[in-house]
Image (tube, rainbow, N blue to C red):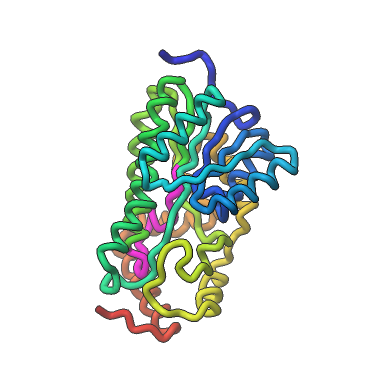
Amino acid sequence: MTSHETIRIFDGATAIVTGGASGIGRALGEELAKRGCGVVLADLQIELAEEVASGIRASGGRAEAAKIDVSDFSAMEGLVQETVKRKSRLDYLFNNAGIAIGGGVHLYGIEDWNRVVEVNLRGVINGIQAAYKIMADQGFGHIVNTASMAGLIPGPGAVGYTTTKHAVVGLSTSLRAEAAQNGVRVSVLCPGVIRTPILESGGKYGRMLIDVPPEQVRQMWERLKPMSPSLFAEKVLNSVAKNRAIIIVPSWWKVFWWINRLSPSLWIAFAQRSFQRRQKKMGIDERG
């Protein structure tokens, strides 16, 4: 039975953020707490998640940590149900956990495909499967899935990652159209380059299949002007509050999306040339 309550934006709300121990997830959790939301930071890195939650509480916010592997549906379902049991509601689910696979497809093993799909896509599906019915029964809720600009444009050199992020965009926009009749909102985040540990992790948040000096990787990302996670989170939550469908931050990355929509073949050609120049500059021959 649908209740007469409505979603809280954001004061007094309850939110779960997967991948909440670092990067975008951490920034979202901290900004949610600043806005009065009680936050569950769900992550495999439980010690780091506990540290972040402790910092939020020390600043006067409400936060707790939970160890979770998003590719495990029973664990995700248990976390959602336990949170709702204690809080009597779930306003927001941020399906944010993700990993990257760097390198040409000819370097992939099937285990690379399996892992990136399990975390980046199956993890989102598991979150939705665990939370959507509860939100529909409440008559309110907002599911926010983290994709990437790689979900809107081609991404040579990160084909597995790009594949899953395109799927997350399609899942999110389709569910948004379906879920509206149940009072449930769905948005998809498509970040440009954000200054997070994944940029220089050397495979910690995924796997690098090519040997590139960290300084070269750093220089490559710096040319794309990474945004600070805190500013990113602030802008994202402003858009979430407005119930935007596709949230692109920094906003200047929308230009790439528009060009790709206007002429997909033009953007593919551009992506091909850019990829080849990047490989040449890094001294990498990735031809299969």
Residue shown at the point (54%, 67%) measured from the top left: 224
Residue shown at the point (45%, 43%) measured from the top left: 95
Is 238 above or below relative to 200? above
Please tell me whether residue 41 belongs to the stretch shown in magenta: no
Query: Which x, y percent locates residue 281?
Result: 44, 84
Residue shown at the point (61%, 40%) measured from the top left: 64
Q: Is residue 168 left or right of residue 249?
A: left
Q: Is residue 117 left or right of residue 251?
A: left
Please tell me whether residue 157 belongs to the stretch shown in magenta: yes
Q: Which residues are magenta?
A: 145-159
For the N terminus, give its image quadrant. top left
Inspect this view and state whether residue 22 appears.
yes
Q: Quadrant of residue 187?
A: top left
Residue shown at the point (47%, 61%) measured from the top left: 205
The total number of labels drawn is 0
Query: Which x, y percent locates residue 135?
Result: 44, 26
Residue most toward the bottom?
A: 283
Is 270 above or below relative to 78? below
Residue most toward the right?
A: 59
